[in-house]
Amino acid sequence: MENVADAGFGLCKNCNNTALFDLKKTTKKADLFFVPVAKWGAEYFLVCSTCDAGYEISEQQKDQLVNEMIERPDNKKMAEIWNKMDELLVNLMKQEVEIGKWQDVVHEKMSIEYKISDLDYIYRHYLKNLMKEQ
Ligand SMILES: [Zn+2]
């Protein structure tokens, strides 16, 4: 499988984690005298970085995802933001700050370093993961 792009966060039904996904592609090649002459039927998969489960998506879904990801940081940076946010939010939980104020604190503390739209994207996934665990 060939790596196409980082695909950001999603919920993996296999390992039940909010995990980072990679967009990968398989192609069937016909080789003539060791020269690839045709590629057809590329298949696209979202692959969970935690458990390696793959989910097939359509070409249209792939295009949409690639478009969305142009605006977003790569998976490495996503993980970095997630970890910092996690530290911050675990602290707020300990201090019993009400959940309605969390997003404001995230903006206040993290928007110097990161884009608000990236913070909100990751915050949404963080909350979804939290709700799942309760
Ligand atoms: Zn998984």
Image: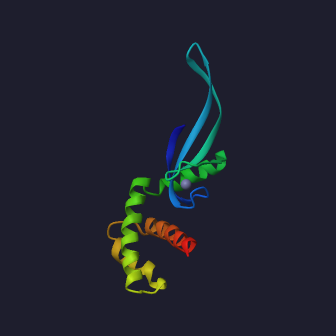
Could you say where residue 15 lies in the image, as x and y percent from the top left?
Answer: 56, 57
Image check: 45 left or right of 130?
Answer: right
Image check: 41 left or right of 83?
Answer: right
Residue 107 visible, this orientation: no
Please identify the quarter of the rendering in which residue 34 is found. Answer: top right
Residue 103 higher or lower than 65, as above or below: below
Could you say where residue 93 lies in the image, as x and y percent from the top left?
Answer: 42, 81
How many numbered discs? 0
Q: Which quadrant of the figure contains the C terminus? A: bottom right
Q: How is the image coloured?
A: rainbow
Residue 107 higher or lower than 57, as above or below: below
43 and 88: which one is in front? 88
Could you say where residue 20 lies in the image, as x and y percent from the top left?
Answer: 49, 56
Which residue is at 41% across, 86% downward? 97
Ligand 1 quadrant assignment: bottom right
94 and 35: which one is in front? 94
Residue 109 visible, this orientation: yes
43 and 94: which one is in front? 94
Could you say where residue 40 lies in the image, as x and y percent from the top left?
Answer: 66, 31
Image check: 15 left or right of 84?
Answer: right
Which residue is at 40% across, 70% downward? 86
Please identify the quarter of the rendering in which residue 116 is found. Answer: bottom left
Q: Which quadrant of the figure contains the N terminus? A: top right
In the image, farthest residue toward the top: 33
